[in-house]
Structures are given as structure tokens and as C-alpha cells.
Image (cartoon, grey):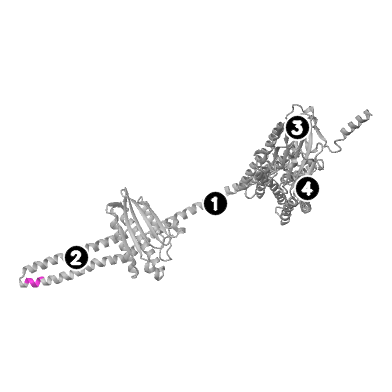
Amino acid sequence: MRKLILQLSILIVYSLPVFGQTEITVLTKDDFKANQSIFLAEKGNWYFRKGHNPDWGKTTTDFSNWQELKPSEITKEFEDENGRIEGWFKTKLKLDASLEGIPLSISRTLWASTDVYVDGELFHAFGNTGNPYEAYNPVLKYPVPIDLEIGKVYELAIHFVDYETSLTQREIRLKPENLKRFINLTGPDYKTWVETDKKKTYVYGALSIGITFLLCLLFWLLSGLNKDQKIFRHIAFFFTVLCITAVGLFLGYFVELGYSAEKIRFFIAVTFQAVAVIYGFLILEWVLTQRISWVSVALLISLVTTSTYAHLFTVSWPFTLVFITLVTYFTRLFYKHRASIRGINLVLLLAIIIPIATNFVYIAIHKYSLDFFNEYEKLIYAIIVLTAPFCLLVYISVRFKEILKEVEEEASKVIQVTNEKRELLANQNQVLERQVKERTASLNQSLEELKATQSQLIQSEKMASLGELTAGIAHEIQNPLNFVNNFSEVSSELIDEMNEELENGDLEEVKAIASDIKQNLEKIKYHGKRADSIVKGMLQHSRTTSGEKEPTDLNKLADEYMRLAYHGLRAKDKGFNATLQTEFDADLGLISMVPQEIGRVILNLFTNAFYAVDEKQKSLNPDEKASYAPTVSVATEKQSDIAKLIIKDNGNGIPKHVLDKIFEPFFTTKPTGKGTGLGLSMSYDIIKNHGGTINVKTEQGEFTAFEISLPIKT
């Protein structure tokens, strides 16, 4: 009887786990995987309850009536109306003696948020399960050390929240092969494994980013240097997209990114992978047909749209339909143009096809597995990114080899044609030499005639300027001649009076009359010399200059030609009036020059100035004419050993588009018959021969000012 009671007691004790107690998971050293991790999500009995209550993490909570469910078995069916999956997992575990002395840690490799409780106390929060929600980014993160005693039973409670529905692809994240790493117990070598994996990732990432970036620059350079090679521009765009894709894929392994930045990185990686695929298809079509059709563009846009729709709403049949249509279209295209797929075209097609095919094969084999512990994933990423660069480098090499061959063939043809032409030229040299002699003789004769014509033309221009002076000179001579005539008549009358006084014997009156006659004769002499001076100046201006310089009063020369030019215009147009302003430097002194030549320059500038203000006045309406005062000014200034002469008018100015041409021979802005176009050209040459400069400042509609600089001593 006692023995029976003992057996029943033992049976009851061993039956307790079945009738209400939770089974305890015993962990051993043999549970470690190759990467020094124990995947707890697949070990022992787990219990789950949907929703959230902070008390559920306490050890006093009875969870034996919860749903028996492992973390690796959770699906998107658990989400609420807001798309949020939230609940609690619980289990019990202990360590056996084989783990004695082995330091352990807790790690997670899933994009979600969890709060881990050990025996009712919060051990660590991976992300933020509250508000605002923030998922945990597991990329190459170090585990959190945990101190567990051998043989002691621990209650492990996990508050789990998944709230990302589109950007990080929940349908991928909640696959069993990814959820098995929901919560891990890692050994002492795990950190070393992470460091090793980091180094491998750095190598793959640095190669992918560096090579695509350098080749991006290379192809943009080739595109700029070879604008006729359109394929270089297409490849440059393709490499730009590949470079951005590589940055999106690997940036998170080089830089610690925050939650928002990581989402942006993921979005860039996914988006530009799609863009790379799209542009790759477009390059394929261009290589085969030398054009891009609207059909392929429409299909590729539809592919991106349906892919995005599938990610957001997990409805994949539109994407599948468009993808099959796209593959069918390009298969038909390949078959139709199969004859052209050889040589560099084959290399170029492989550069596009291999990374696209590798990407699809990778997806098909791994079923979108986000295995961050799999080093081959980084290698496949690198292959996807780097296959195109290496194939396209081969393409460049082959293409330039073909170009060099074409250049050599063209060079051989050129050499052959050159030799043939050399023989032909040798036979024609004698004929050409005879023709050259005949043409040279003819040209020499034409040159002599041209020189004679040029001299006549210059003399004609001088005579034209002389004609401009004639009316002014006539006006200037008329004044002294009037004085001479008037004083002559008065003197004749005084002589008659003097004779009468002599007969009367009034000597005092005779002396007074004689004195008046003498004064009249002096005035006649003065005005006669003035007329003589004007005539001599006219003769000096008209005669051919000897080219000899002489000291000249520039102030007097400028004043004289200003008045002559003004009176010359008034003789033609009695209604013309203008304000003359002078500002002469009294300390200027005499300047060594050829006065006839400088006089021609000054006369030409004054003539142009009066013409400009006259034309502006004629173009104004009556109201504008009332407020406009035609003004021409002349000023001299001494600056060290330079004498400056400035002639300014307030006419219409010179248009900017002709400003650079005004000193060219035969260029004129005046109507036909009113200008030869030689005045300013000759003026420029004269000033240059005197060692000076002539510059112009103008503002259209406001003024024009010519500034002449002459050396005082030469």
C-alpha cells in the first residue's frame, strides 16, 4: 500500500506540467548555431496574448491560458484595424551546466520594436513600442550582455509591436525564416563574428560605391568628350542610378542612421534599384533598335506603379501581369534583332542583363529573406552592383579598340589618297607656279591702283571736311570784311571833313580828324589780319601736310574749329541752334603736333557732335523739344605729361551693338550720302601716329564723349 501511494505521488509530480504548469526550456551549449546564436523563437513552449497590458510582464501573471504560439509563427493576420500588430510572448527557460562560465547576451535581428522582461523586470527596450512608435534597426548591432545563473528558471516576457506596413515590407519581415531570429541568446564569439561581418560588408560596400562612383564620372566625361556617342550618355545615366543604389544599399553599414534616416535609406535603395532595372531595359531596347519606344516606357512605368501598389497593399497580381508582359515584349525584341547581338552589343547586353537576372534569381532563391547574418547576401549585392561596371569597362575597351581600328583604316585610306594627290600635285606644281607668277603681277598692279585710289579717297575725305569748313569760314571772313568796309567808308568821309577844315584853317580840328582816321586804319589793319589768318588756316587745312610737328595752342585750335563747324552747320540749316560750352585749361601750354592733322580730327568730332544733337532734336515731339537744349562742349586738361581733349554732346548716343565698329574704315551710322565712314577711321590713325589714344564713352539716348590723349612732348 505504501509503495502504491509513493508511485501515485511520483506520477502526480511528473504530471504537473501537463495539468497547469508551463514546460521549462533547457538551453545547452549544443544549441548554438554557427554564428554563435541560439534562436529562442524556435525553442520550447511560447505563449501569446494579443493586445497590451503592462501587468502582463510581471511574474505574477498566469499565462497558462494564453494561446500557445511561438514568435516565429506570428502573421499579419494579427494586425488590428490600424495595421498595428501588438501582443505579449512568454516562456520559461534555464541553462544547463554546459553553459557554465560562458558570457551570454541578448540580440535581435528583426525590424520591429520589443520590450524584453526577465523575471518581471524590464531588461532592455529594442526600439520604442509606445507613441511615437520607432522600429529597431538591427543592422550590425552589438548584443546586450545578460547575467544568467546556471540551473535557475527564468521567466522571459516580450512585448512585441510591429507598425510598419509598407516601407520596410511587412510581408517579407513576417516570414518564418526571418521571424526565427525574433530573439536570440548569443555567445562570446558573436561580437567577433559581427566585427568580421562588418569588415566584409565594408569591403563589398566600398567596392560597390567607389567603383560605381568612379565609373559614373568616367562615363559622364566620355559623354562630354564624345557627344556623337549617345550610348555613353545612356550608360552615364545608368551608372548614376547604380551609384545612388549602392549608397542606399550600403550606407547603413558605414554610418549609424536614426530611425527616420534609415527609412529614407531603405526607400532610396528600393526605389533606385527599380529605376536601375527600368533604365537597364531602356538601354537594352536602344542597343537593339537605336530608339526607345513608347510601349517599353509605358510598360516600365506600369511596372513601377504596380510594384509600389503591391508593397503598399500586398496585391501582387497586377505587378505579375505587367512583368510577364514586359518579359514577353523584350523576348520578342531579342528574337527579332538576334542577328545584331554580337561583339560589343553582346557585351553591353550582358552588362544590363546579368545584374537584373541576378537580382531576380536572388529574390526567387531567398524568398525575400532579410538574412543579415548571411555574408553571401552582401556578396550578391556587390555582384548585382558591380557586374554592370565590369562588363561596361569591357565594352569601352572593345569599343575603343574598334574605334582605333577604324581610325587606322581611315588613316591608311588617307595615306593612299595623299600619295595619289602628291603625284597629281607634282604634275600641277609647274602650272600653279606659272599661274602664281601671272596672278602676282596682276596683284601688284592692283595693289598700286589700290594705293592710288586710297590716296585719292583720303584726299577726297580731306576735301569733304574742307567743304564742311567753307560755310563757316565764309561766315568768319564776312565779319572782318564788314569792319574793313565800314571803317573805310568812315575814313573817306573824315578825309573830306579834314580837307574842309584845312581850307578853313582850323588846324586843331584837322589834327583831331587825322587821329580818328589813324584809329580807323588800325582797326582796318586788325580785321584785315584776322581775315588773312582765316584764309591761311583754310589753305593750311586744304594743302597736303608735310608731317612736321610744331608747337600748337590746342585750346585755340579747338575753339576755332568748334566755331567753324557750328557756323558751317548753321549755313546749311538756318533753324539749327546749339549751346557751345568751353572749359580750357589755361596751364596747358603749347603741344608738339601737326596742326592740320589734329585740326581735321577735331573738326570731324565737332561735325559729328553737331549732327548728333541736330538729329536728336528733329526726332523729338513738340513737348520734348521744349525741354531739350542741344549742347556741345569741349574741355582740355593737363595730366602730368599728357594733354586731354574731351568733346561731348547730349545727342542720342551710340548703340552698343555698333560701338566696337565705329573706328573701322567705311563704317557709318549716317544715312547714305551723309557720311563716307572714313572720318573716325582717319582720326584714329592720326591720333595713333601722334602717340596718343582716342576713346569713346556713350550712353544710348543720353550722351557721347570722345576723349583724346596726346603726349605734350614728343
**Quick one: label 4 or label 1, which is nearer the N terminus?**
4
In the drawing, does residue 495 fall left or right of residue 686? left
* Residue closest to the eye, 553 or 276: 276
Image quarter of residue 449: bottom left
Can the viewer see residue 370 in this picture? no
- Structural distance between the alpha carbons of marks 1 and 2: 77 Å
Question: From the viewer's perspective, is the residue at label 3 or at label 1 nearer?
Answer: 3
Give the residue number, with chain letter if any, for mark 1: 431
**Quick one: label 3 or label 4, which is nearer the N terminus?**
3
Q: Is residue 143 above or below residue 521?
A: above
Give the residue number, with chain letter if any, for mark 4: 78
Q: Residue at coordinates 41% horizontally, 70% vertically from top-left?
A: 621
Task: Confirm or deny contact between disc 2 and disc 3 (CB under 8 A).
Answer: no
- Structural distance between the alpha carbons of marks 3 and 4: 31 Å
Region in magenta: 498-502
- Structural distance between the alpha carbons of marks 2 and 3: 131 Å
